[in-house]
Amino acid sequence: MEIICNQNEFNYAIQLVSKAVASRPTHPILANLLLTADEGTNKISLTGFDLNLGIQTSFDANVKKSGAITVPSKLLSEIVNKLPSETPVSLNVDESSDNILIKSDRGSFNIKGIPSDDYPSLPFVESGTSLNIDPSSFLKALKLTIFASSSDDSKQLLTGVNFTFNLKYLKSAATDGHRLAVVLVDNKENFNEKEDIVNNEENLSVTIPTRSLREIEKLVSLRSTENSIKLFYDKGQVVFISSNQIITTRTLEGSYPNYSQLIPDNFNKLFTFNTKKIIESLERIAVLADQQSSVVKIKLEEKNLALVSADAQDIGNASELVPASFDFDQFDIAFNVRYLLEGLKVISSENVIFKCNLPTTPAVLVPDNNINSFTYLVMPVQVRS
């Protein structure tokens, strides 16, 4: 193999696909990137795959001789990243020894590769369901829910986001057992299913791991100007394809919890805050709350004002009055301040409505304009008087 490419493009591709390289590979070749070069198309393709998440990207180069080799990901990344920006980089592979010679105008590096024959193939979905996804709708659904997924590996199904694709809408939900974020994006025109989904009642429901979604989010963000991104799903595997990039990931197996039954139908306590003001107040109070239990209390008793406070035993306390709108006499409730802030920060409306029944039952936060049908349910914290 013999290629000449631009340092910037090569470096960008390496950084992108190395996110899918295993940090503790079960086999030496999984610590490598697969590099293939095609003389006919003058394109270089780079692939990283840890058997769960796979990322592939391609870019233009001067390919003098076709070939394929796997290169140590960490070593290649550090070498190319430190080469002078925008300069030509040449790469030669000695097929008899698998030695890789990397040259720039400043010098050369010789590293040992592993033949590409043993590198696992990315799973491609040949049958199953295919959808055209509107990038902006998908990003919206993802950003409004991904923060609420669990980081606890023992709750495997909750370490991802559940997506439901329908002819009329895209719905996403995430929960860690303490809070739940759900959003419904109505975008009928942008989902162009094949005959696999024949009517509005039939859904495709998949739960995608959060780790994979962080990389899919980057891919979709880069392609947000495109009309659509292709999604293929079959037998526990999802593949996202844009113009020159592919991301494949296993789905999380099992039935996602029936979260709609967790959301109460009616509420007898509603109070409204200016979103920006309550976030700023909670961030200040969190300085004390985070010192100990992360608990913040909200007390509604004075007309048009809420007392937001935190007590950190033997350290100190903090309190602040925040404008609020409500029409009942008195109500006290407490939350984990981080859960509250993470939900509030994805709300883009000017005001946010808190819906509650009791200080011990789930509270629901919704934007006052709720264009995207966003619901954030959070369990209160029980505080001893």
Image: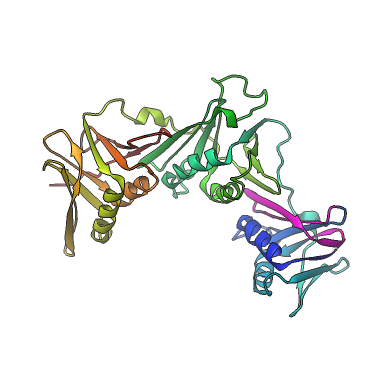
Q: Is residue 57 above or below residue 233?
A: below
Left or right of residue 254: residue 288: left
Residue appearing at x 50%, y 32% in the figure: 255
Q: Is residue 47 magenta?
A: yes
Q: Quadrant location of residue 267? A: top left
Q: Is residue 335 magenta?
A: no
Labels in figure, total: 0
Helix, strand or loop for the magenta stretch, by majority: strand
Q: 206 or 276: nearer the eye?
A: 276
Q: Residue 173: in sight, yes or no? A: yes
Horizontal and vertical percent position of residue 286: 27, 57
Residue appearing at x 80%, y 61% in the figure: 115
Residue appearing at x 60%, y 30% in the figure: 191
Q: 326 or 255: nearer the eye?
A: 326
Q: Quadrant location of residue 20? A: bottom right
Horizontal and vertical percent position of residue 328: 14, 33
Q: Is residue 214 above or below residue 357?
A: below
Horizontal and vertical percent position of residue 287: 26, 61
Q: Which residues are magenta?
A: 41-69
Q: Residue 45: in sight, yes or no? A: no
Left or right of residue 56: residue 39: right
Horizontal and vertical percent position of residue 337: 29, 51
Which quadrant: the N terminus? bottom right
